[in-house]
Structures are given as structure tokens and as C-alpha cells.
Image (spheres, rainbow, N blue to C red):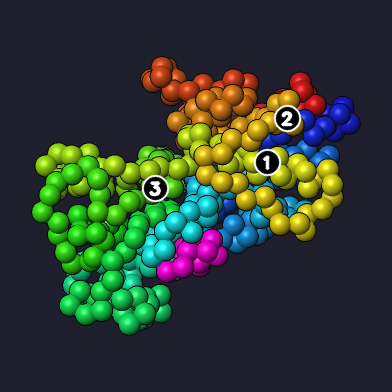
Amino acid sequence: MSRILRRCHSTLGFVFDIDGVLLKGQNAIPQARETLTTLQTKKVPFILLTNGGGVLESARCDFISQKLQLAQPLLTRQLVQSHTPLRTLSSKHRRVLVVGGPGDRARGVAQEYGFQEVLRPIDLIKANPSIWPFHKYTTHEVDEWGLDPELSRVAVGGTNEPIDSILVFNDPRDMGSDIQIVLDLLNSENGLLGTRRTKSTSVPAVPIIFSNNDLLWATDFKLPRFGQGAFKIMVQALYQQTNNGSPLQSLTLGKPYKVCYDYAHHVLIDYRNSLLSGDFNRPPYMPQLNSSPAKTPFDKVFMVGDNPESDILGGNNYHWDTILVRTGVYKDGDFEQDSKLARPTFGTFDNVRDGVFAALEKYA
Ligand code: G3P
Ligand code: MG
């Protein structure tokens, strides 16, 4: 161990997935604390890159730091959530419907990103109670979380203004009403709720951006759970069904896509610069969407993940090294079942500590 710690340097970087690597549901994975603490102690740059989200980056950092009992809490500038890059679009989309995430917290996230008018499906339910008669929101939740109709201006038959775009921030909590409302808008006349355009086309009435494509993700249940990618498949299927077979045109961010890794690469470089300068108070660099760093100061970056279809595939395509762990979605035998699955360049390990320490042993 002492040799590992002595030779850490800043041309080596790590990018950690969260669910299935550091956390399992609400619980810390045992080896995560020692791993991150070791990197912090020797100032090896690392960030977290998750397809999760739905809350403020600061809140997520606080939660993870507390769960992992980190003596040195994670900094907001070390976290990229699935929707973090959407911050770059706040000047282009004025009146947005933000879907998914716990309670009403995603509204605050979108507002912090600078979106001028942020609506939630519950606002549309509050203004039009019959829009989906089976929703599971309580009266208290509709009262507390839903905007009053004179503020949201989405009452069909009342004050009703078009919605510009749909941003899926995280996994839906009331899937039925989210599906109905999203399809209403995709098939509307220019985003006006309660209208139905006549033509069938691949181009939706309003653009929709999914913040990740995860069909499955690891929780503390024995088997992986459906993620936002499953919701996307449902939306796509119903759109095709209601548009004479035309496939839905949409944009998807998150791992494994290059747009996500470019954004994370900028964040990792910026965090390394803070480590070197000791200045963590200057505002973090805000990358633009689809901008690749002109050059990198890293000799090696390791992407550490549990999902071959997001973490490993994305890391490999980005020409980073990749470490796969057995504490999440991936299970031994998966590669034999599906030979097309992306394989880790550095290896498969029982847990995050074993993988990171093997990498430090070899490259630090
Ligand atoms: O919603 C969380 C899930 O999509 C996966 O998160 O941290 O494994 O990328 P993560
Ligand atoms: Mg994961």
C-alpha cells in the first residue's frame, strides 16, 4: 500500500460511476470509502459520472459523502449527473416540461440551471385533474408540488400556453401520467396541451431529450431494475403506434454517448486544475455541449463502472481505460451470454477498491 500512495500523480485520473460501484440503492458499497479516501489523500484527480440524477448536484454530493463517511466531502465540481449537461441548453429552451425524479426536486434543478419556465407533469394534473385519472399523487402532493394553474398556464379550456420542450431528467415516479402527458405533447399542435395534430411524422410537435438510455441499473434488489431507457422505449413504442409507424426523433444524453464523456472530460480537467492550484472557490468551468477538450493533461484515465452497456462501452469508445466491477449490473457469465457486450480494457474486479488499487499499483 505505501508504494501505491508514494507515487500517485496528476496525469492519472479516475471517473467513477455511482450506482453499482459506490452505492447500491441507498447503501454504500463497503470498499468505496477506502478507495475514494486513498485518491483524495494523494490528490489523484477523480470525478463521479452517473446516469442517475433528479436532484441538485450539491445535494447528491452531500448524500454520497455522508453515505461513504468521507472525511473530505465530495465537491459539486466533481459530479456529472445524467442531466448536468442540460445546463448548457437553458438559454435555448424557455418553457420546459421536466419529467422524472423524486418529489418536486427536479424543478429546482432546472431552475438552478437557468431554465426560465419549469413545468412538471403534476402541474398539468393540477390544472386538468382528468388528464390521467389513475395517477398516484396524493391531494397533499398535488397541492404542495403542483403550481397553481394561473402560474403554470396549462389549463385546457383555460389559460393555456404551449410548452417548448420535454426534458427527461430522471426515472419517472408516476409512470402512467408521465407517459400520457409526454405523448399528449409529442402529438400536440406545437406543444399546446389538449390539442392533437392530424399528421403522422417522425418529428415530434416538441423536442424531447432523454438524459440517459439505461435499460437496467443496479439497486439493492437482487436483480437489476428498469431505468430511464425502459421509459424511453415505452415512449418510442407509443409514439410509433400513434404516428402510423414513424419512429420518434429524439436526443439522448448520458453514458455511453460521446457528448457525455466530452462533458465529463472537461469537468475532470477542471477539477485537476483546482487540485494543482488549490483554488476550489473559483467557479467551475462550464463546458458547452458536444465540445471536446482541445488537449488532455492525462496520460491515463480509468472509467470505473458496473454496466458494460453504458460505463464500459462509453469509456472504451472514448479511448479511456475501463474497469468493470461485479457489485452492480454485470454478473459473471454475461460476456458468454452476449459476446457483443463491451469488455473492460483493464479488467473485471470484485469491487471498486480492487480495480482502482490494481490500476494504481501499475500506473501510479
Ligand atoms: O438512474 C440511475 C441509473 O440509470 C444508473 O445510474 O450511477 O449506474 O450510472 P449509474
Ligand atoms: Mg452503475
Query: Mark 3 falls on what kind of element?
Result: strand
What residue did someone put label 1 on?
Answer: 268
Query: Callout 1, which amino acid?
Result: Leu
Query: Mark 1 falls on what kind of element?
Result: helix
> Is 245 a magenta residue?
no
Q: Residue 162: x, y in percent?
A: 28, 66
What residue did someone put label 2 on?
Answer: 298
- Do we see residue 126 in this rendering? no
Query: Mark 2 falls on what kind of element?
Result: loop
The tag earlier along the polypeptide, 1 or 3, is: 3
**Total number of numbered discs in the rendering:** 3
Quadrant placement of the N terminus: top right
Q: Residue at x 76, y 41 (%)?
A: 272
Label annotation for residue 210: 3
Quadrant placement of the C terminus: top right
In the drawing, does residue 280 fall left or right of residue 155? right
The tag earlier along the polypeptide, 2 or 3, is: 3
Camera-side residue of 17 and 155: 155
The residue range painted magenta reads 106-117
- Do we see residue 262 in this rendering? yes
Mark 2 neighbour density, 10 Å: few (under 14) some (14–19) many (20 or more): some
Camera-side residue of 5 and 57: 57
